Structures are given as structure tokens and as C-alpha cells.
């Protein structure tokens, strides 16, 4: 404890500035700028509501990201469980007092922002698990006690989110949690067993799904089943992307989008719009930016000394990967439509907030990368 | 130290597993990239087409129909301005309310409203509903006045078919109406079909559809997901249908129609050299303009139930026994085959001593008899007894060869009118095949006066007359101007041959086919004899149409009357000898007349038929006489106009 304090106090402000990952910041700015253009295009090239809001949110959350980057990583460590429990409580509050929109109750009205606690839970679960495994010896890790506890910690928020209902976010939370359990070194056989169990229980799982969720999954396997209903989104999305070609139709020239054939173009289908206007080339560049972002986050984990920082960074990198992969695979028709935003690109305050928050913790890991965190 | 070692181990596990995860991520990203490649590069074309299909919608714009003109370029079928009310369906929020308002403004009845709802059901939400395609000016201006209250309403100035000579031409030009499912299957209509387009239902309008219909235009619009038009991308202009020029002279046609007013019958006029049909009137008639916007039940029933049958085009679809108008052909056949010497004398002794064959009596029409007759006189006075004997000697098969050669028994205009009849020129072979009976000589005898099985259309009689009058040359009858024929050459060639006595080239007594403008006679003197006899029939005392003659050589014509029985004349009828007016209409004879004019240098042939008109000399010949004057008066004009036209072409 003493050493920790001494080490932490050793960081001068200049040292901190020096150890900032500027490439990471540059990547955030790059993807953020692209997102502004994309949102601007969804409004048919008019500088109005969505574009304005998105710019304001980006600037506020980016500043928040910079500010929180200087919070010590040990502070995040200490408050990890608190963060998780606050998240759980918010999810419970949503269950009873949430705002409904299109059949789902996901939001809390905070007057300046409609907060979606499930988005915060995405970060909270990573923090929570990073802390949980930070202190467990590798020899104890395979014991049933340490196996059951995280599973319970994971199931509660997932269940609450499914109740909203929000299958997409729930899967992403589960995915991030499982990623950290994997990183912590749990024996592969458990993954194999639970994978098999999942397969066996799939028919039962499907039977408890909501009708619209079932139809989405059926539609995924055959979009032409209902081309004007459930299959409409995916068919139109594929048409938009495919017709973009190599160079795309050009900025503000995406006909599928401005003629309103594309649904939810500023949120889940923002990649579709981008890909229609900027083509294969633009899509690959955007994908590359995300890969770089993930690489930089992993890199922070690699240079961090504490397990907490390592687990958090690797876990968060995997989470970002999952968000990007699920969203793009979904709009490309490779996965069912489950409602998952594209990090930074998609319009939506809570999602942006949670990503920025997550990134600021990564940055704090980078700045305080030599910090040792005591087990207790 | 142990702790430290464990920690190092733990760090290694985390890092190793991170790399495994990273490898998985790279694989999955590669999957996404290849999917993008598939969509955007391999299948790009497919998706581009789908995207265009999404955003581009075409509207076809109807073309204007080609106009129809007469020989003098007078418009017979035009496109008139009409006022229409269209509803743009995707601009309407409350359809019921809009219809209610429109109903109050222009006054629709319950039936019409029902029809509109039915029509709307068949339309797509972005289509246009035509509420009315023919508003009155009053309705149209009222709609414009209340336009701000009517969402989606669009007053439209459009065109629709109009026939300025309405009743006078319906049997020639025909009329248009909405396309039936059967119409749409025809290739010429299918290719150019636009919903709401009017298509030909009869006559020239129908048979010349491929020229008249034109090509539709295409307006391409970019539309959004809900079908709203955003911008016009492309407009391919529609092309009006081609003009169709007829050989008809509307003035003569009008006059012919006027002469037939109140009667059932037909008048046909043909140029004996060019084959151009100058007039082809049929009576009674009806107004084609009533059909354009759909005829109402009352008018339709009136036309259908008229006992004089206005819907039948009597010139080509009316079948009549030619009666005595057939006699010139019988005489010509007998002369050509050398059956009879024109100086042979036969005595007609009247009803008391009729012609007898195997115990059956055959009467002449003239009660007191004609006395001693030679052939010329027999034609002139139309003596039946002479023709009974001549037909008997000639035989029906030889007669049918000549009758068919001069245009009987086969439709005249071919494909133009689908209701044109072939008529019938009987012979022994026909009877064997069609009725499976052998021919009786008695049938030959009555065939000799144009009764019995023989059936002709008025236009066939006109063609027959023309081909006798031009000296026995085959012509090509037609009603649509044919620019491929050089009329001057045709006339000069025939006239030159008439005076130069060409040599025999083939056996003209056989049943052979002739090309156009070729001679069909065996001996020229035979044709000349018939022409001269017909002159006598009109211009000499005791001739059957003597009373209708003109002495002025300019108008002088030659003709032959005919009275066609519609039933067997019994002995009782002969005894009663009633006047036409005293007989029940349906049982009265048809009156016929054929003629050509002017007698010197003839140019026009005419046939007149008045159904149940009584005798040809009283009912038909006077009409022909009046019309011939009009035709001759207009001849110079026609000649000038046509030569002017050919020199231009």
C-alpha cells in the first residue's frame, strides 16, 4: 500500500502528458469526425437536429474522456464493484420507472439525457470482472466457488436487460463478461461444456423469446420470407451496401438513405449509409480504423503492470470488437438484426457515453501503467 | 517469491489467451471484409439494379391517336380537347371525404361512385384515378373553383377521339372505346398499351390500330420509400400515331348517307380504274362519338333494338340476292362462251304462258310479257324469260367462273373489316361439297336472274360494275390511300389497251387468276356489248331506269336495275299484284341498282341497295342518279387534288 502511494505520487503532470496514447486520441477523433459526416448525410445534407446533437454529445463526452483519463487506475479498481451495483440498481429502476419506446423499456429520463443503463452495464461488467479476477490466484481460479460467483454476477444484468427487452445489449454484456472469464484463464473445457449446453437448450431458449425476436431470427435465415415486413430492413441494407460498389455513390448521394428506404439509418444502420456512400474502399478504411483502435487498447494492456489493467484493457478491446462485429455483421445480413449500435458512429447518447467512459479507463491504465494495485 | 512466480504465470495466461482472442478477431474481421467484397464488388450489379428499382418508378404517358383523313385531307377522326378530373391517390388522406366533395361539385350518381371505388381497388397507391374523362366546361370550371378544398384533385386538359362527321362515317371509320382484356392481348396494342388508352373497336380504327395507336411516352421519377415523387429524371416523349388517309370523299359520302336517310340500305361508289372507294354508305347509322367514353345503356339499347339494324355495315356485311343486277354478268358469260348469239330471239309471253322446265313454271316480272326479245333488249328491259333460257344453255359452272372473275363471291377489302362477308356464287361443285346434293337445272334457271343461292354484298356489285365499265380489267379495290400505285400509269395502260385490241395470251375461258390491271375478257366486243346494253337500259325508252337518266352527256350514265325477292312469289301474289306500299315491310322486295358514269369515258361505278324498297327502278335508280351528278361535279376537283398529291410525292 505504501509503495503504491509512493509510486502514484511520483507521476508528475508532464509524465502523465507524455504517457498519453496520442494515437488512440487521434483514432477517436478520426472515427468521431467520420460519424459527424455520416449523421449529417442521414439528414439529407442539412445541418439539423441529429447532427447538432451528435456534435454536442461528441464534444462533451470527448472532454469527459480527457478529464477522466487522469483519474488513477486504482480509483477505478476501488470503485469497480460500486459501479457494477449502481448499474444493477439503475437497471432495476428502468424495469419499474423506465421510458418506453417502440415496445421496449430501456431508458431513464435524466432531463438532459435519456440514459440507457444497459449501455453503462457494458462497461461495468468489464470493470467488475477485471477487479474480481485481479485478486484471484491462478491456482484458485478453477475452483467451483470462483466459477459460480462470476456466472451469477453475469446472469443478473443479462436477465434484467433481456426483460426490457433488449436481446442485443444483453448478448453484448454476456459476450464481454465471458471474454474476461476466458482471459482470466478458466479451463477451456468449461467453455466447451457450456457451449454444448447452450446448443442443447437453444430450442427452449427460442421458445421463451418474444414473437418479434423469433421473427427476426427466422428472417435472418430467410429475409425473403417477409420482404416488406421483418425482412425489409436487411434486404434494403444489403441493397444499399451492394449498390455502393467500390468507390460508393458519393457523399450525400446515397439514394437508399435519402429516399428513406433505409430504416434506423442514424443508429443501427449507420454503417450501411456510410458503406453506400463511400463504398468498399471507405468501409475497409473504417474497419481498419476500428482494428487500430482495438490494437491500441490491447497495447495499453500489454504495457500495464497490473492484472486489473490488463484484464480491463483486453476485455474492453474484445467488447469493442464485439460491438463492431455484431453491428456490421448484422447490417451485412450475417447475423440476425438484434439492435446493436456501432461504437462512436451510431447516434445515441448512452452508447457514446459508455464507450467514452470505457476509453477513458483505458487511457488511465496507460497513464498510470506502472501502478501496482494491491490485492486488498 | 512464490507469489511472484504465480503472478508471472497468471500474466502469461492472460496474455496468451488475449492473443488467441486477437486471432479470432482477425478471422472474424476477415469474414466481414470478404462479405463486403461479395456485396460491393462481386454482386454490385445485382444490387445496383435493385437500388434503381427501388428509387425509380416509371409512368407511361398516353400518346395521341393518329388522325384519319379523307381523300382531300379533311379530318374524319380527330383528337379533341376534353376536360378530365384525375385524383393523385398518394396525395389524398381521406379518400371518402374527397369523393364526397367531388360528388357534390360535379354531381355523381351512386352507380358512378361505386364504379370509382372499384377502379381504385385495382390501382396502386401511387397511381392516378381518373374520376371523369369527359367533364363539361361547367363542371370543369366548378372543380377549378373549389380546387383548394380537394386534396389530390387534378383538373386535366386532355384529348379524346372525336368524329366530326359522326353518323356519316361510322361504318367506314369505326369507333374507339376502352381496351378489353382481349384487345390488350393483341401485339400492336400490348406493345403500346397505357392504362386508360382508347383502342379501335371497329373499322379503320380497329384494323389500322398499329398505325394509329402511336407510342407511349415514359416519365421516370425518383421516388422515396413511400412512393412520393421526388424529382423527374427522364422524359421520353410520346409519339402520336400515324395519319391514315382514306380514299373516301366525305362530301359524296355525306350525300350518299343523306340519300339513304330513313331507309335501310347501302350505296357504294368506286373509281373504276384505281379501285379507290369514294363512298361506302350504310343506313341506318349511329353516332361513334357516343362510344368514346362508354355508351350508356339507353343509347346502346336504342341502337341494338332498331329493326333496321344500324350495327350491320350493309355495304360489306349485308348479303343480298343481286336480282337483275346480275344479268350483265350472265349475258357476258353467255357471250364469252359463245352460248348465245345476241341476235337470238326469244318470246316473252307474260304470266299466262310462263317459261316451263320439267313442269315447273318460271315467270317474268312483267305481267303482260315483253314480246320478242333479242339479247340487248332483254338486258335493257330486264326480261327474265330470255335469261332463264340463256342460263339454261350456259350452265351454272361457266356462269360462276365469270361471276367470280368480276368480283362476286369473295370479300373485297380483305383484312380491313372483320365483318366483311364473302357472299356466295354457287356452282355444282359447291353444292355437292356444302349441301351434299346434286345440282338441279331449275336452280341454274333462277340463278340466271340473280335469285336462288347466289348472295352478294353491295360492294361486290359495285366492284363488278367497275370491272365491266373499265372494259374488263381487274382492279384493286381499296379504301386506304395506296401511294405505291401510280394512278396515272394505271389509267393510261388500261385505256391504251382498250383501243389496241391486245392478242390472246392465255385461254380466257378457263378458271384462271388474274393480276391487277390485267384484262379478264375473252373478246372485247362482248364487254362492249354489255356496256352498250346497259346504256340502253338507262337511256332508251322502255329501259328500266329510263326515268332516272340524264341527257347531258357530262352526267349521262349506264346502269342496270334489280329487284331482289326476299321470299317465293306465289300465284296468289301474282293475282293480287299489290303495290310495294301495300305489302308488309319485311316481305317487300329489295331494290337494287348498279351503274357507271359518265357513259362516255366512264370513271365511277356505283351500287345502290334499298332494303325492302320495292323495285330497283323506282327506289334505287333515282338515288343513284342524284348521287352520280354530285360525283361527276366533284370529279375535276378530285383529279386535280390527286395529281397534285402524286406530283408532290
Image: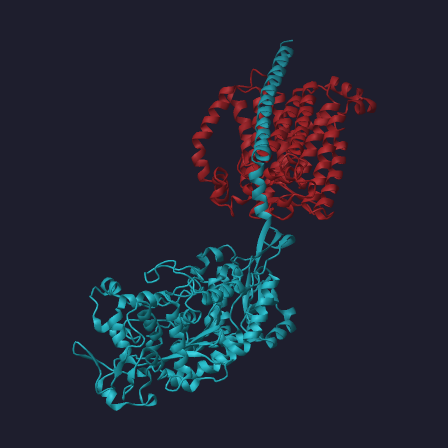
Q: Position of residue A241 (x, y in %)?
A: 60, 38
Q: Colour of chain A?
A: red
Residue at image position (35%, 74%) is B328
Quick one: A161 or A48, which is closer to the camera?
A: A48
Q: Position of residue B372 (x, y in %)?
A: 28, 84
Figure colour scheme: by chain
Residue at image position (58%, 52%) is B57
Which quarter of the rendered picture does the C terminus of chain A lie within? top right
Left or right placement of residue B585 versus residue A337 in this view: left
Answer with the quarter of the image where residue A293 lies.
Answer: top right
Please identify the residue farthest to the top as the structure is shown.
B1
- The answer to whether residue A281 of the structure is visible from this angle is yes
In the picture shown, does residue A51 fall above or below B74? above
Left or right placement of residue B150 versus residue B267 in this view: right
Left or right placement of residue B408 versus residue A23 in this view: left
In the picture shown, does residue B9 fall above or below B220? above
- The answer to whether residue A160 of the structure is visible from this angle is no
Answer with the quarter of the image where residue B215 lies.
Answer: bottom right
Q: Position of residue A135 (x, y in %)?
A: 62, 20
Answer with the quarter of the image where residue B595 lies.
Answer: bottom left
Q: Colour of chain B?
A: cyan
Please identify the residue farthest to the left as the structure is shown.
B359
Quick one: B294 or B19, which is closer to the camera?
A: B294
Residue at image position (71%, 24%) is A365
Quick one: B602 or B198, which is closer to the camera?
A: B602
Q: Position of residue B114 (x, y in %)?
A: 47, 69
Which quarter of the rendered picture does the N terminus of chain A lie within? top right
Amino acid at each position: 500500500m505504501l509503495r503504491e502511494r509512493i509510486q502514484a505520487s511520483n507521476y508528475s503532470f508532464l509524465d502523465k502528458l507524455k504517457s498519453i496514447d496520442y494515437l488512440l486520441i487521434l483514432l477517436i477523433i478520426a472515427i468521431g469526425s467520420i460519424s459527424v459526416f455520416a449523421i449529417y448525410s442521414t439528414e439529407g445534407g442539412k445541418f439539423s437536429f441529429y447532427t447538432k446533437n451528435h456534435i454536442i454529445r461528441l464534444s462533451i463526452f470527448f472532454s469527459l474522456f480527457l478529464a477522466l483519463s487522469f483519474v488513477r487506475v486504482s480509483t477505478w479498481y476501488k470503485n469497480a464493484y460500486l459501479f457494477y451495483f449502481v448499474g444493477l440498481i439503475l437497471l432495476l429502476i428502468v424495469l419499474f420507472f423506465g421510458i418506453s419506446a417502440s415496445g421496449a423499456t430501456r431508458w431513464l429520463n435524466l432531463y438532459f439525457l435519456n440514459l440507457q443503463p444497459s449501455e453503462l452495464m457494458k462497461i461495468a461488467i468489464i470493470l467488475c470482472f477485471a477487479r474480481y479476477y485481479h485478486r484471484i490466484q491462478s491456482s484458485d481460479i478453477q475452483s467451483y466457488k470462483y466459477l459460480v460467483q462470476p456466472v451469477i454476477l453475469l446472469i443478473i444484468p443479462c436477465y434484467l436487460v433481456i426483460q426490457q427487452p433488449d436481446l442485443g445489449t444483453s448478448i453484448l454484456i454476456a459476450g464481454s463478461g465471458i471474454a474476461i472469464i476466458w482471459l482470466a484463464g478458466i479451463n477451456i473445457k468449461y467453455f466447451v461444456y457450456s457451449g454444448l449446453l447452450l446448443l442443447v437448450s437453444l430450442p427452449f431458449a427460442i421458445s421463451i423469446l418474444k414473437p418479434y425476436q423469433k421473427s427476426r431470427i427466422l428472417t435472418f435465415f430467410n429475409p425473403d420470407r417477409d420482404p416488406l415486413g421483418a425482412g425489409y430492413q436487411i434486404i434494403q441494407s444489403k441493397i444499399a451496401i451492394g449498390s455502393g460498389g467500390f468507390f460508393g455513390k458519393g457523399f450525400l448521394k446515397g439514394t437508399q438513405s435519402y429516399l428513406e428506404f433505409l430504416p434506423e439509418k442514424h443508429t443501427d444502420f449507420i454503417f450501411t449509409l456510410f458503406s453506400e456512400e463511400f463504398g468498399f474502399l471507405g468501409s475497409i478504411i473504417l474497419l481498419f480504423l476500428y482494428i487500430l483502435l482495438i490494437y491500441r487498447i490491447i497495447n495499453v494492456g500489454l504495457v500495464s503492470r497490473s492484472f486489473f489493467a490488463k484484464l480491463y484493457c483486453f476485455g474492453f478491446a474484445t467488447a469493442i470488437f464485439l460491438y463492431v462485429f455484431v453491428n456490421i455483421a448484422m447490417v451485412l445480413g450475417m447475423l440476425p438484426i438484434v439492435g446493436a449500435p456501432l461504437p462512436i458512429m451510431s447516434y445515441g447518447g448512452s452508447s457514446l457515453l459508455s464507450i467514452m467512459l470505457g476509453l477513458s479507463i483505458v487511457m488511465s491504465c496507460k497513464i498510470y501503467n506502472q501502478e501496482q494495485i494491491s490485492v486488498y | 517469491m512464490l507469489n511472484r512466480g504465480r503472478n508471472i504465470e497468471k500474466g502469461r495466461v492472460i496474455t496468451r489467451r488475449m492473443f488467441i482472442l486477437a486471432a479470432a478477431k482477425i478471422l472474424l474481421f476477415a469474414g466481414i471484409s470478404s462479405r463486403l467484397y461479395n456485396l460491393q464488388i462481386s454482386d454490385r450489379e445485382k444490387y445496383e439494379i435493385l437500388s434503381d428499382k427501388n428509387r425509380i418508378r416509371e409512368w407511361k404517358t398516353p400518346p395521341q391517336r393518329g388522325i384519319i383523313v379523307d381523300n382531300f385531307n379533311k379530318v374524319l377522326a380527330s383528337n379533341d380537347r376534353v376536360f378530365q378530373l384525375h385524383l393523385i391517390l398518394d396525395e389524398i388522406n381521406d379518400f371518402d371525404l374527397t369523393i364526397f366533395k367531388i360528388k357534390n361539385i360535379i354531381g355523381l350518381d351512386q352507380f358512378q361512385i361505386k364504379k370509382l371505388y372499384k377502379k381504385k381497388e385495382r390501382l396502386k397507391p401511387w397511381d392516378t384515378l381518373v374520376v371523369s374523362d369527359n367533364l363539361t366546361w361547367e363542371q370543369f370550371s366548378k372543380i377549378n373553383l373549389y380546387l383548394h378544398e380537394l386534396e389530390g384533385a387534378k383538373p386535366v386538359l386532355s384529348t379524346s377521339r372525336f368524329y366530326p362527321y359522326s353518323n356519316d362515317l361510322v361504318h367506314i371509320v369505326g369507333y374507339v372505346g376502352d381496351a378489353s382484356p382481349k384487345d390488350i392481348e393483341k401485339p400492336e396494342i400490348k406493345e403500346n398499351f397505357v392504362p386508360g388508352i382508347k383502342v379501335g373497336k371497329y373499322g379503320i380504327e380497329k384494323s389500322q390500330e398499329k398505325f394509329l395507336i402511336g407510342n407511349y411516352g415514359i416519365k421516370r421519377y425518383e421516388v422515396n420509400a413511400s412512393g412520393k415523387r421526388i424529382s423527374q429524371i427522364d422524359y421520353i416523349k410520346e409519339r402520336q400515331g400515324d395519319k391514315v388517309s382514306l380514299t373516301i370523299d366525305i362530301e359524296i359520302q355525306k350525300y350518299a348517307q343523306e340519300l339513304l336517310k330513313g331507309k335501310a340500305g347501302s350505296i357504294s361508289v368506286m373509281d373504276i380504274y384505281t379501285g379507290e372507294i369514294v363512298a361506302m354508305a350504310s343506313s341506318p347509322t349511329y353516332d361513334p362519338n357516343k362510344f368514346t367514353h362508354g355508351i350508356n345503356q339507353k343509347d346502346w339499347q336504342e341502337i341494338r333494338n332498331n329493326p333496321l339494324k344500324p350495327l350491320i355495315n350493309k355495304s360489306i356485311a349485308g348479303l343480298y340476292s343481286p336480282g337483275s343486277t346480275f344479268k350483265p354478268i350472265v349475258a357476258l358469260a353467255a357471250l364469252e362462251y359463245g352460248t348465245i348469239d345476241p341476235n337470238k330471239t326469244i318470246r316473252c309471253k307474260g304470266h299466262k304462258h310462263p317459261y316451263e322446265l320439267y313442269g315447273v313454271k318460271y315467270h317474268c316480272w312483267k305481267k303482260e310479257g315483253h314480246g320478242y326479245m333479242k339479247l340487248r333488249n332483254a338486258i335493257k328491259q330486264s326480261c327474265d324469260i330470255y335469261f332463264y333460257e340463256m342460263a339454261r344453255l350456259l350452265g351454272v359452272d361457266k356462269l360462276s367462273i365469270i361471276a367470280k372473275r368480276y368480283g362476286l363471291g369473295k370479300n373485297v377489302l380483305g383484312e380491313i373489316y372483320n365483318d366483311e362477308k364473302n357472299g356466295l356464287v354457287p356452282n355444282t361443285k359447291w353444292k355437292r361439297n356444302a349441301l351434299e346434293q346434286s345440282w338441279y337445272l331449275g336452280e341454274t334457271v333462277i340463278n340466271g336472274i340473280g335469285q336462288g343461292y347466289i348472295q352478294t354484298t353491295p360492294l361486290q356489285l359495285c366492284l363488278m360494275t367497275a370491272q365491266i365499265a373499265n372494259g374488263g380489267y381487274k382492279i384493286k379495290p381499296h379504301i386506304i390511300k395506296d401511294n405505291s400505285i401510280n394512278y396515272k400509269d394505271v389509267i393510261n395502260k388500261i385505256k391504251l389497251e382498250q383501243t389496241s385490241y391486245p392478242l390472246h395470251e392465255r385461254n380466257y375461258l378457263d378458271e384462271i387468276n388474274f393480276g391487277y390491271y390485267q384484262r379478264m375478257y375473252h373478246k372485247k366486243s362482248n364487254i362492249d356489248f354489255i356496256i352498250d346494253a346497259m346504256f340502253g337500259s338507262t337511256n332508251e325508252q322502255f329501259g328500266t331506269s329510263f326515268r332516272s337518266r340524264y341527257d347531258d352527256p357530262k352526267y349521262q350514265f349506264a346502269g342496270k336495275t334489280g329487284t331482289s325477292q326476299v321470299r317465293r312469289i306465289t300465284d296468289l301474289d301474282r293475282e293480287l299484284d299489290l303495290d310495294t306500299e301495300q305489302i308488309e315491310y319485311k316481305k317487300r322486295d329489295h331494290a337494287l341498282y348498279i351503274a357507271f358514269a359518265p357513259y362516255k369515258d366512264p370513271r365511277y361505278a356505283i351500287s345502290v341497295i334499298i332494303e325492302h324498297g320495292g323495285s330497283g327502278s323506282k327506289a334505287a335508280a333515282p338515288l343513284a342518279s342524284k348521287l352520280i351528278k354530285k360525283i361527276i361535279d366533284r370529279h375535276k376537283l378530285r383529279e386535280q387534288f390527286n395529281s397534285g398529291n402524286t406530283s408532290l410525292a
